[in-house]
Image (spheres, helix red, strand yellow):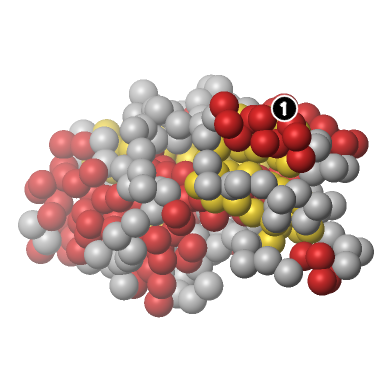
Amino acid sequence: MRVKMLIATVDTDYAFLISDNLSEYHAELIEVSVCNTLESMQEVLIRRKYDVALIDSALIGSVDISMIHLPLLLWSEHEDNAATQSEHTRIKKYQRVSSIAATVLERYAQVSNNRHSQAAKNANITAVWSPAGGVGKTTVALAYAASRASEDKDVFYLNLESFSSTPGYFRQSGKSISRIFEMLESPTGDVKMLVQGICCFESGITYLCTPDNYDDISILSNENIKELVAACAGLADELVIDLSCSCDDRSRQVFELSDKIFIVTAQEASAKTKLDQFISQNNVFESIKEKTTLVANKGAIVNTPPVKALISLPYVQSQEEKQVYKTLSGKSFGA
């Protein structure tokens, strides 16, 4: 689904600047139309309905906008405040067009009646988990994501750790994933569109910025998890989900949804002990065994693998976390 957007402003140069940028970089999400006069705006609104419109103060009070689902006021700090008094949400001019696109999609997602968007893609879902901390689980998850991205796959990395390690690997320049959590708790809104609106892209991987508060993840229900995973899977060829070390209801839900599960271990005795306990004492292992691959990270040696598939990764010495996962991405992760 593409959002039908009208840009209505008397500032012709700005109108076509933003229109050209949206058409070049956001064409998959937004379909743009432009008008620069009251007459042209009246004419286009007779012919067509719009999902969203960015309308400047010179036009917004002079025409019937009932054919626009979400009218937004396009304003500048240099304008007369009296001229911009309006009940409509404001969108600031002269900011990065990518920020405008993100805000528009977020706002429209909140008022959309399309709760369950049809997935344009149906990603292969890989969960990455470990019963022990410190084994390099996130590094393995990102190495696998990067390896798939190098094969020209659209890759989405979803971090569901209670305490996210994402800032150690990616810029946190976008809006928090907590925006999505709030919508998941609401009966309305287009979750997939909101994900599209606020996701970030770096090093060939799409990702979401960290929660505002670590408790935001802990309150997610299984139904919330299912809806979030479905939304992200609809945007990629490969969805890599990085989980916390606990084997809680949230992790079990992701295991159920996944096509493949990587269980990561390392050479430390504590890692091996916890893995042995999970295998021998937790009935979850038997239910996921057939789709599980054991990843022996940091040069770990596994004499008797508990599953058929085993990936052995070397120990990479580097103080740069990004360099470690990028180095490991060149290793074989199997089919």
Q: Position of residue 78 (x, y in %)?
A: 91, 64
Q: Is residue 269 left or right of residue 198?
A: left
Residue 166 visible here = no
Q: Is residue 263 above or below residue 311?
A: below
Q: Quadrant of the C terminus?
A: top left
Towards the viewer: 98 or 109? 109
Q: Is residue 246 above or below residue 154?
A: below
Q: Is residue 217 left or right of residue 306?
A: right
SS of the residue under disc 1: helix
Residue drawn at x 13%, y 55% is 284
Q: Is residue 228 above or below residue 333?
A: below
Please, what is the three-letter code of the amino acid marked with disc 1? Answer: Glu
Q: How many numbered circles are shown?
A: 1
Residue drawn at x 69%, y 61% is 90
Q: Is residue 105 left or right of residue 174?
A: left
Residue drawn at x 78%, y 56% is 57
Q: Position of residue 80 (x, y in %)?
A: 88, 67
How packed mark 1 is, by other alpha carbons closer than 10 Å (few <14, some 14-19, many 20 or more), is: few
Towards the viewer: 64 or 187? 64
Q: Position of residue 191 (x, y in %)?
A: 40, 50
Residue 54 visible here = yes
Towards the viewer: 146 or 45? 45
Q: Quadrant of residue 26?
A: top right
Q: Quadrant of residue 203?
A: top right
Residue drawn at x 8%, y 57% is 283
Give the residue number, with chain letter if any, for mark 1. 24
